[in-house]
Image: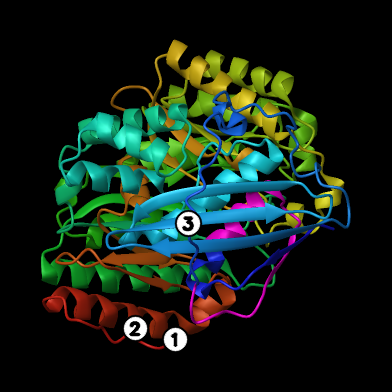
Amino acid sequence: MLRVSIDPIHETYHYDIQHIIKLFAEKAEIHFYDEADSLGSYDSHEALPPDHSALSRRDGKTDRPEGRESTPPGMEWKLSFSFRREEKEVHVVARLTDPMGKEARGEAIRPLQDEKRAVGFALLRALTSYTGIVQPWGILVGVRPLKLYHKMLEKGMKKKDIHEKLISEYGLLPEKVREMERIADRQLQVLPDLYHLSGEVSLYIGIPFCPTKCAYCTFPAYALQGKQGSVDAFLAALLEEIKVMGTWLTERKIPVTTLYVGGGTPTSLSADELDLLLSTLAEVLPCREKLKELTVEAGRPDTITPEKIEVMKRWRVDRISINPQTFTQATLKAIGRHHTVEETLSAYRLARSMGMGNINMDLIIGLPGEGMAEYQKSLLHIEELMPDSLTVHTLSFKSASTMTQKREKYSVASAEEVSRMIRYTEEWTERHGYHPYYLYRQKNILGNQENVGYALPGKESLYNILIMEERQTIIGLGCGASSKIISPTSGRIFRFANPKEPKVYVEHYRDYLEKKIALLEEIYSQDEKESLTFPKK
């Protein structure tokens, strides 16, 4: 196993350093030597060679597409950073050496306030030089890269200046910057008031039940008749939570922009249970006429029936998701989805024939055993159906998933093949009239890539834009639902999560609800204070 030993550096930089190293050497054992109070200095102004070949590869390809296998077992990298601070800027050099005598270095000069970014960029340059691997998203380690783009726009930066900054200071490939620009433009066309929605909220309703749990999934997904208690008990608790929150919003005269019913699989509920849920939401939510979007995830096609579609139409659900993930039957079986390709096709046609006018479908790039041929086959089915939107995920190995815990069982595509599939997706969607409109990233995502939502014009999910760009409060109700409360005055974000397990939720939802209301009251009742007291869980 590769060991990476890092000379003393302040712990402020540890997280980003670890994250960037893991992009190049996923299984590396990283050791930080004892921290030093002083970060040190150096006197030389040695520069990197002007023709830095590893950075000139802009097509996403590498000399070693698997990258992580390029280091012999048992090797050790030694990594050190040196700093020189001047009046207004800092010069950072990262040096990497191995026992074979190979050395690589990277450097960055940044304003003093950007020292953390300088450390990451210098490290990225050194690792790219050493491995020949180009990281498409540079030093960006967060889930929401578009937030950075929007902040630059709000500051009045011109697009060409943003483009240059993201490449030269963050290390992004030009095609990723162009993708961000297209998506930001689309979001502002769809939601011209995106920067001014803090006075409203959106709601997320978490339904924790699912026919089976997929191997890659970490969302709440419990059996309807399992050990986690009855659906009746869960629904009773959820409806009470909805009513109390509806009362609070009504008293405050806070409108709801979008409503998203997710999970799990909400259509695991019976038609009568779904009717009770949607009717309660319609009854208690304030300013129902101002609601811009109501989405219900119907992700598992084996849960969709004419009766449930009729219920959703009755309560003006205007967007649903039917998620095949793949149209290869062997893959569905391997990942634990106990439905057939034909059931997906039939469910889609049923929903369309009954008048559902905005249907999303999901695909996942890099599922076990799948390469370009299988992915192209899935897109042929998508071409036949032409859903209103298509969300393309890149497989992520989430720490709590079955797939991650038994990773040796699953063979997945190389980083280079994943990159080819993503480029093919971009070309395919453009040919078929789909526009990218939201994007997010995850840890341990294949090829260090991204998830992108594409839509036909006018069929974009407003909720997806709002949750990803963190432009308004999202109140989570139900199992595993996370509230992301954004102060209307300062933009500070406060998080509050409900329990994932239905049994725990049913037993304690009143306590969680009380604390959530208290947090909302504190944020919405006062001008922003220097510090807020969080309710203890």
Residue 504 left/right relative to 96? left
Name the residue rendered at 76%, 46% in the picture.
102
Q: Which image quadrant for residue 358?
A: top left
Alpha-carbon neighbours of circle 2 within 10 Å: few (<14), some, or many (≥20)?
A: some
- Applied colour scheme: rainbow
Q: What amino acid type should be assigned to the residue bearing mark 3?
A: Val
Q: Is residue 213 above or below residue 439?
A: below
Residue carrying label 1:
537
Residue carrying label 2:
515
Residue 314 position within the rendered picture, expressed as x and y whole percent measured from the top left = 32, 41
Residue 275 position within the rendered picture, expressed as x and y whole percent measured from the top left = 40, 52
Between tags 1 and 3, which lies in front? Answer: 3
Per the model, the C-alpha gap separating discs 1 and 3 is: 42 Å
What is the span of residues highlighted in magenta in the rendered image?
16-39
Alpha-carbon neighbours of circle 3 within 10 Å: few (<14), some, or many (≥20)?
A: many
Residue carrying label 3:
92
State if disc 2 and disc 1 touch (CB < 8 Å).
yes
N-terminal of the pair, mark 2 or mark 3, is 3
Q: What amino acid type should be assigned to the residue bearing mark 1?
A: Lys
Residue 518 position within the rendered picture, expressed as x and y whole percent measured from the top left = 27, 83
- On the question of residue 356 being in view, the answer is no
State if disc 3 and disc 1 touch (CB < 8 Å).
no
Residue 257 left/right relative to 337? left
